[in-house]
Amino acid sequence: MKKMTKQTRIIIYSSIFIAGFLVFSAVLYFISSKAKVGGIETWVTLALIAAAAISVGIVVYARKRIKRTARLLDKEYFEAYELIADSFQGSVLGTLEKKETLNDILGLFIDAMNSGRKVEQVTGGDIDGFIRKVKESFGYRNGLLFGFLSGCQYAIIYLLFIQIYEWLRNSRSDSFFNANPGYSSLVILMPIALIGLPLMRYFIMKQKIVIAMVIPLAIFAADVAFMEITYANFMHIGFIKTLHEGDLSLVPGIGFLILWLALLAITYLVKWLLRKSSIRKM
Amino acid sequence: MARDTQLLKGLLEGCILSLLEEEVTYGYKIVEKLEDYGFRDPQEATVYPILNRLEKKGLLKSEKRPSEIGPPRKYYMLTDEGHLELGSFMEDWNELKLTADRLLEGRK
């Protein structure tokens, strides 16, 4: 059985570290909320712990799947294939495009390996260049725009999750549409959705896995620092006070719920149209 | 001139279309054939993106066929548009070749 490659070890250990951080935060949240066992806070804490465990499980499974798919490759070819597969995960290509391209590259590698060619002869000794050329063969796609659209998708999904959480927390007294999440919850989630996740995808695509894993932690730390400093020193400023104590109505009625879902659908549609038009422009 | 530059860029594309007109085949075989015809050290890293681009442009189509050594192989073949493109490439290439021959023979 082949040993784990360095790339796989980094990814698995990073995912365990982030999951551990998430579990720690969830437990801290439960303790600081002074909630009763059995309340919504208990379920949120358990859900976060379960999500952390599932995330690690998914990462390990995904690595095993790459290994199983590419089991016919020797070590040299496998390492190159793994780098390519990881880079494609963060790319703006569609799911089917990624799958088909990776299958094609695997087939090419197996043929070349069985013909006695070295991996450097196949990739020209420049795996990054090979990846870039393959991506370009799908036509030009604006990575920044795709990243922004993905960020919008994460943001809308987070908003809806926050709304559901607030509703469950007050469900005995309030309807779903009357739940008003605090601004403070948006201060952390929006930067992660709109900046953190697109940046993570970018760095995964560039094979800078460690930087990608540090980004959410850095944003979280920056957010905590910002909230603590502003709470200690600037609560006399109206905007800061609202940020800490105010709340807002994200989904005040069925019309708004439909609007959020329509916006989500539009982002998927725009991404699909951009992919189509990039092929037509070639 | 711009057209000629474009033609030079498309030389390998034209050669691949020509190879596929002769025979329906797969990526690695195309690399081997280019080598047999004298292309120096052709790489999958160059050929595969070209095949992918030609397929996306509708000049090639592909089908998977079983392979005895691994996953099914992707075999490429010309579409009607691919045949037209090859014809157009041949015309441009012959014109460029004649011009270059005239120029170079005049220097002898």
Image: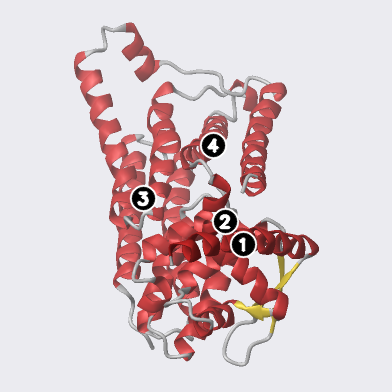
Q: Residue at x 32, y 68 (%)?
A: A7
Where disc 4 sits, the SS reads helix
What subunit carries mark 2?
Answer: B
Identify the image quadrant of residue A87: bottom left
Query: Which residue type carries mark 1?
Result: Trp
Q: Mark 4 — residue?
A: A149
Q: Quadrant of the N terminus of chain A?
A: bottom left
- Residue denoted by label 2: B7
Task: Say above or below: A205 vs A249.
Answer: below
Mark 3 or 4, nearer chain start: 4
Local SS, label 2: helix
Residue picked out by circle 3: A203
User: Horizontally, is A107 left or right of B25 in the view?
Assistant: left
Q: Chain of mark 3?
A: A
Residue at x 19%, y 15% (from the top left corner) = A233
Q: CA distance from mark 3 to mark 1?
A: 43 Å
Q: Chain of mark 4?
A: A
The residue where tag 1 is placed is B93
